[in-house]
Amino acid sequence: MSSLLSSLSAATRALDAQWFGLDVTGQNIANVNTPGYSRRVIDFAEVPPESNRSAGRGVDVVGVRAVRDQLIERRLRQELPAERREAAVADALSVVEVALGGPGESIDAAMNRYFDAFASLAQSPSSSVARQEVLLQGESVAAAFRDMAERLALSQRETDGQVRSLAAEVNDLASQIAEINDSIQRISDPGSRLHLQDQQGELVRRLSKIIDVDALPREDGGIDVTIGNGRALVIGETAYPVSVSQINGTTHVFSGTVDITSEIDGGTLGGVIHTRDVLLPAYVADLDALAYEFATQVNALHAAGVGADGGTGRPFFAFVPAIGGPAGAAAAITVDAAIAADVDLIAAAGAGGPVGDNTTARDISGLRHARVFGGTATLADAWGELVYRVGRDAQVARDEQTSRRDIVTQVEQLRDQVSGISLDEEAMQLMRFQRAYEANARFFRAIDMTIDTLMQTLAR
């Protein structure tokens, strides 16, 4: 009788185990589209027999666990920041490309119109209408430089604003990770922590898209997170938020009292900082150099020429506020106030030339083809080089993003092979546990009927 009751107990335990298997399979199917969810598997163990007269006492559920490969997870956290960095650079530079305009539609067109106006003045040196056109085109080209400088400055301000908003996102995610660490510490059953660890893994992946991180698993099931050169962001249940501060008008990121801006290289934040601190300043410097060289070359020829009033030594362009070199030239260039007030001051003739001389007008018009940049490049060439540089940097970023995205996709596919849900596999598991439950139910019924027969026999 005791062996029959033991078999009945074993059958009951087996029914519970197979039902649990069905429950775990159903959980996997339900979360097939849940971000960060890792496939659950159930671990069974046979229950050893009490004596050599027993085959065993059935099966027991050891526990349920999430299938994760820490090596793959770590590789994914390493690849995501690089991909998002290049994406951020490509996005920022696409705006700059639009701001620069197409060939023949931007500063190059304004300079050509200005030189065309002087060419017209050379044909009619005494024409006040031609002088008025020169003034108009001079104001136009100066405005084009100032407008382009403002567009680049706007891009710098926008990227600077992104640094502040991204730092706030980092702090928000760090706070959530710390809260989950605290919750995990309070749960003693490892199986009950699985959903929290899934949420935590998804938060770390989101964080790694913003900034390059290093995540270290804790013995209690939580995770510690560092950024930069090993700067603590989350340790246990404590978050160490980053802060931002303005230094010389630029937002810097701090960990505690340490400026870690230069330590941030990956993620969207790293891409934004690289664009703001490296790429955009280089474009601004090139634009300033072009504006400064353009104005300097024109002023040198114009000051040597003679206006309609017989005066000489006047610059055509000025810089307001005054500058001491190329830096800031594009934002400050304007037509000299005296020239703007009286077009007769515009020089067309050369010094000591005859009445109706057009030497200066022809010389300024000829700057269009003069190789004034190091003796090798024209003003148009310098503008073309700037446009090409921006386009090249943007294309490099897009190509690198594509390459990195392919790597991320491959790693994610590896992760899905380990941790992802396959509905076909889960359907097979569902059938497997269903058949096992049915078989154990028949075994249970057979034992129950045997016990019932035995009880009826004993009752006679």
Image: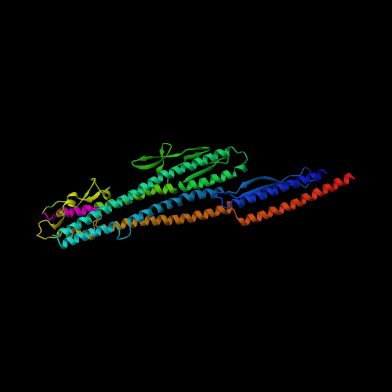
Percent position of residue 5, x then y: 80, 44
The image position of residue 302, as x and y in percent, is 17, 54
Q: Is residue 297 magenta?
A: yes
108 sits to left or right of 453: left
Observer-nearest residue: 87 or 309? 309
Of 21 and 73, the residue lying toward us: 21
The residue at 51%/44% (across/down) is 215
Predominant secondary structure, magenta span: helix
Q: Is residue 338 above or below residue 231?
A: below
Q: Residue drawn at (72%, 48%), measured in percent from left and top?
A: 15
Q: Is residue 72 left or right of residue 358?
A: right
> Farthest residue toward the right?
460
At which x and y percent is residue 454? 85, 47
Q: Visible in this render: residue 209?
A: yes
Query: Considering the image in quadrants, where does the C terminus appear?
Result: top right
Residue range corresponding to the magenta coloring:
293-309
Quarter of the image for residue 134 reads bottom left
